[in-house]
Image (cartoon, grey):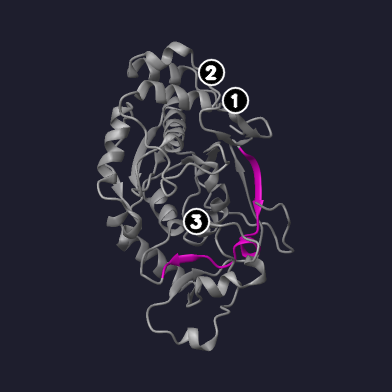
Amino acid sequence: MSGAKSSSATATTGTAEPARPYRGRFAPSPSGALHFGSLVAAVGSCLEARVRGGEWLLRIEDLDPPRERPGAVDAILRTLHDHGFEWDGPVMRQSLRTDAYLAALAELESQGALHACRCTRAELAALPENRDRAAGEDLFHPPACTAPPATRLRAGAPALRYRTPDREIRFMDRVQGAQAANVARSVGNFVLRRRDGLHSYQLAVVVDDAAQGVTDVVRGADLLASTPRQLLLQQSLHLPRPEYMHLPLAVDETGRKLSKSADAPALARASPAAQLAAALEFLRQGPPAELARAALPEVWAWARANWRPERFCGMREGRAGSGLLHGRPQECNR
């Protein structure tokens, strides 16, 4: 996230609304089994919802069939149940939401906020802005496509990108504090529909959070950099803006994020209480040693009674199993 200011005015993002009853959510993707990092996000989002007297929804982000693993959805639901999670209402499946995403794209198209793109990753990677990008980081796309004429005539459907306005976006994260970014300068025009016809995470998460009435998004700090893009889309689609709370990210001994794509170890079904206690310890909640051997209702009762997000405010990441969190401690914006 950049603190550099644009020459244009700071954007006011989202639609102001009267306060709504708290509604949070957990939204895993079925690209593999839940791991310790997933558990931290689920525990944090669920506890915040329950302590604030709200609902906690479950959404399966099955947008990308090529990355899905057979049986992953059932395994995710079973793991959550085994750990004592209880969600409100039916489970939303993004794979059944195509019409909603098409309607959002049509609205953006009517505003002139989309452009077709046939640039390849190799062509974008060759741009000066992308030569030092870390592996896995989104590639910068300038205001106009840079693809050569032969690429522009390539057969097949183009990707659809959002025409990103050149202005600073600011928001207050309830754990990470004040944030500012100019998406046009850091990411540029970003993809909403891929060339293979699949819709992007950035589009779907905005449409579905609004459809589910989500008031508060509690998730891992790896998604902090995505938030300004989502705020821009909320503004363009005239959707309400949730509050955001980005939890410390669990990393391995090399500093790499625990992820399904990197085959992070799956949660064990045999010791749910111990794993919940480990997630609470990671989040600096200070669970007593005996909690790891307690019955699940007792673990959850203790967690609700002792939930204190201010204990990890300002912390960006920590090594799984070490209890060490890294970042700058600060007061929570609650």
Marks 3 and 1, how far apart at CA: 31 Å
Residue with the mark numbered 1: 311
Residue with the mark numbered 3: 234
Labels 2 & 3 near each other (Cβ < 8 A): no
Q: Which mark is residue 286?
A: 2
In x, y percent, where is residue 140? 59, 66
Closest to the observer: 15 or 285? 285
Residue 106 visible somewhere in the drawing: yes
**Earlier sequence position, callout 1 versus callout 2:** 2
Mark 1 vs mark 2: give the one in front: 2
Query: What residue appears at the point 47 percent right and 30 percent down from the top-left corner?
Result: 48
**Earlier sequence position, callout 3 versus callout 1:** 3
Query: What residue appears at the point 35 percent right and 56 percent down from the top-left corner?
Result: 67
Q: Amino acid at mark 3?
A: Gln
Mark 3 vs mark 1: give the one in front: 1
Closest to the observer: 190 or 67? 67
Magenta residues (range): 176-194
In x, y percent, where is residue 105? 41, 67
Position of residue 34 in the picture relative to residue 180 (left or right): left
Marks 1 and 2, how far apart at CA: 9 Å
* Dot 2: element: loop
Q: Amino acid at mark 1?
A: Arg
